[in-house]
Amino acid sequence: MKYTSAVILLVVIAITAIVGSTIERASTRALSTSNYNSPAYMVQDYTVVESDLAGNPAVGTLDHCKATCGNNLNCVGFTRRKRVDDIAVGECWYKSNIADAHVVNFDPDWHTYVKV
């Protein structure tokens, strides 16, 4: 009986250590995605159909798209569908150049977020 109690105690300690470590890693990941150089963005009612960065489209919430673009020195902005809620996951098309790109004025379906 003594050994059974000791084994149970060791199992509980091991599980507590694993769960604590997992929670710590998860909270560190959450901080790393929210702790970024947050530029301001100007929202435009047009879309940019050129100058896509590699890896497009990416998917995420609006905050995720802003954070990812904010952490990429080559990203000057991104386009995202208007009908996707800010907290919903949607496509983000990161752009390397907006000034010289082909712009479709007043696009009813897309917003362009430009770093300011």
Image: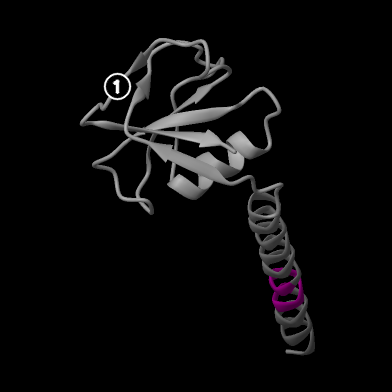
In the figure, is residue 38 to the left or right of 43? right
Q: Position of residue 46 (x, y in %)?
A: 33, 27
Query: Which structural element holds mark 1?
Result: loop
For the C terminus, which image quadrant? top right
In the figure, is residue 29 to the left or right of 48? right
Up the image or down, 75 lies above or below 34; here it is: above
Magenta-drawn stretch contains 83 = no
Residue placed at 73% from the left, 89% from the top?
1
Task: Assign the magenta stretch its main secondary structure.
Answer: helix
Task: Compare residues 25 and 3 and report the one nearer the observer.
Answer: 25
Name of the residue lying farthest toward the bottom: 1
Total tally of numbered discs in the picture: 1
Residue placed at 74% from the left, 63% from the top?
21
In the figure, is residue 71 to the left or right of 53? right
| Dot 1 amino acid type | Asn
Neighbours of disc 1 within 10 Å: few (<14), some (14-19), many (20+): few
Task: Compare residues 7 and 76 and report the one nearer the observer.
Answer: 76
Determine which quarter of the picture holds residue 3. bottom right
Determine which quarter of the picture holds residue 49. top left
The magenta span reads 11-16
Up the image or down, 115 lies above or below 9; here it is: above
Name of the residue lying farthest toward the left: 108
Q: Position of residue 6 (x, y in %)?
A: 79, 83
Up the image or down, 116 lies above or below 1; here it is: above
Q: Position of residue 100 (x, y in %)?
A: 52, 10
Up the image or down, 99 lies above or below 116; here it is: above
Residue indicated by mark 1: 105
Task: Compare residues 12 and 85 and report the one nearer the observer.
Answer: 85
Residue placed at 23% from the left, 31% from the top?
109
Q: How is the image coloured?
A: one colour
